[in-house]
Image (spheres, helix red, strand yellow):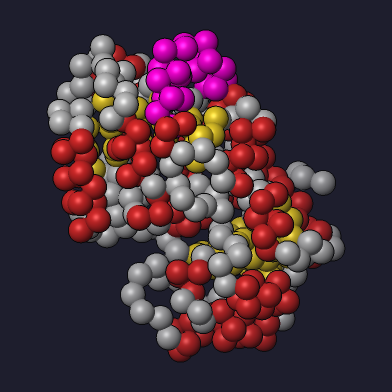
């Protein structure tokens, strides 16, 4: 199918222009759909604060039903706070096809079932999520999109953060919360004495949280003078932040997908990730390498910092994956799905 879609009009219900992975994803997708000629009306749902059924119904009231062909919902459990039933019931009254992207699945099974029943199609980002979701007739896999990007040259990038260019750097970049598993990374680095740790990121709203402060204190105790925390960096600084890292680690305890990890792949970085479903899928196509536990993580960090050829192979695999998941290709798949649902 494919082709220009100037006559296709959709409403995208999503968080918008806040520090939120769903908002970042949606903005990139909307921009890519616009390049395909799709007219997108963004209907904002708040990311933070307590929700009520009336607030969610007010979101539905903002949808310009007379101007659109289809409604696309960017769903995540924490945003909807258990209010999916009244929200989707009100959506159905607009009598427009509904496509939902489930950015996480399998956490609330009743919610998943309700969304599957109310939606014409449900998009997930990988096979692992499709299996967990459990409604194959409704489910379509479309990769989490990314923009293949270049990094700042390593010496320049390290110097810009006050890092000695000769120091091997193991990095993490993304939101920082308990399930991200950064304790494992800090512990593993104890066994990598000739390298330093570079943890970039923060939380959605606050500069620091009690958890981040505890992690910082832990890293100071275990890795004295070997761990830097520059905090949240702007999009403009991302090429320098990734450029400063010789190796990027994502030690998440749980994930259905990771926009941060995919951003590291889009910058052509060698990535080590915890051995969980979505990351195992990427390992099978050569995009990254997984680890089983702290001992395995430490051993693989040392191996990759020493073995430049293996690191180069992972970087090549990351760039290949990013090309396949580029936003233009992802947008084309969305357009094809919209046309299928609309039977046009």
**Furthest residue in direction bottom, as rendered:** 54
Residue 175: % across, % down: 35, 49
| In magenta stretch: residue 13 | no
Where is residue 235, by image quadrant? top left
Q: Which residues are magenta?
A: 297-316
The residue depicted at 76 percent of the width and 44 percent of the height is: 3
Query: Quarter of the image holding residue 324?
Result: top right
Q: Residue 97: x and y, percent?
A: 72, 72
- In this view, the residue farthest toward the right is 343
Which of these two is toward me, 322 or 82?
Answer: 82
x, y percent for residue 179: 40, 54
Q: Is residue 54 left or right of residue 157?
A: right
Q: In this view of the protein, can residue 324 be seen by the observer?
A: yes
Q: Which residue is at the front of the view, 240 or 296? A: 296
Q: Residue at x 61, y 39 (%)?
A: 280
Direction from residue 53 to residue 332 in the image, left or right: right
Q: Reply above or below: 78 against 38.
A: below
Residue at figure coordinates x 50%, y 69% from the top left: 77
Q: Is residue 306 above or below residue 75?
A: above
- Residue 87 place in picture, x, y as percent: 56, 82
Residue at image coords 33%, 50%: 176
């Amino acid at each position: 199918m494919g082709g220009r879609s100037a006559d296709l009009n959709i409403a995208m219900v999503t968080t918008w222009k806040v520090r939120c992975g769903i908002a970042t994803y949606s903005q990139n997708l909307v921009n890519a759909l616009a390049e395909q000629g799709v007219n997108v009306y963004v209907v904002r749902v708040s990311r933070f604060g307590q929700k009520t059924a009336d607030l969610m119904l007010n979101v539905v009231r903002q949808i310009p039903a007379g101007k659109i062909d289809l409604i696309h919902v960017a769903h995540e459990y924490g945003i909807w706070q258990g209010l999916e039933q009244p929200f989707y019931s009100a959506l159905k009254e607009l009598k427009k096809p509904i496509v939902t992207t489930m950015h996480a699945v399998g956490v609330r099974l009743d919610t998943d079932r309700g969304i599957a029943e109310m939606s014409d199609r449900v998009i997930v980002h990988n096979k692992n999520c499709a299996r967990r979701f459990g409604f194959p007739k409704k489910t379509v896999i479309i990769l989490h999109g990314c923009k293949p990007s270049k990094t700042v040259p390593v010496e320049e990038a390290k110097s810009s953060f006050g890092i000695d260019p000769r120091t091997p750097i193991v990095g993490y970049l993304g939101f920082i919360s308990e399930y991200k598993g950064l304790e494992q990374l800090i512990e593993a680095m104890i066994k990598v004495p000739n390298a330093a740790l570079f943890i970039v990121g923060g939380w959605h709203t606050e500069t620091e949280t009690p958890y981040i402060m505890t992690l910082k204190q832990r890293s100071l105790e275990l890795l004295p003078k070997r761990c830097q925390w520059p905090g949240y960096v702007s999009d403009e600084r991302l090429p320098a932040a990734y450029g400063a890292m010789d190796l990027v680690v994502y030690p998440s305890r749980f994930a259905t997908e990771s926009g941060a990890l995919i951003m590291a792949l889009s910058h052509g970085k060698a990535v080590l990730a915890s051995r969980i479903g979505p990351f195992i899928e990427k390992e099978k196509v050569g995009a990254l390498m997984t680890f089983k536990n702290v001992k395995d993580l430490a051993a693989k960090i040392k191996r990759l910092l020493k073995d430049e050829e293996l690191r180069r192979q992972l970087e090549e695999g990351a760039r290949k994956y990013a090309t396949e998941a580029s936003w233009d290709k992802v947008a084309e798949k969305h357009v094809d799905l919209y046309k299928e649902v609309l039977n046009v």
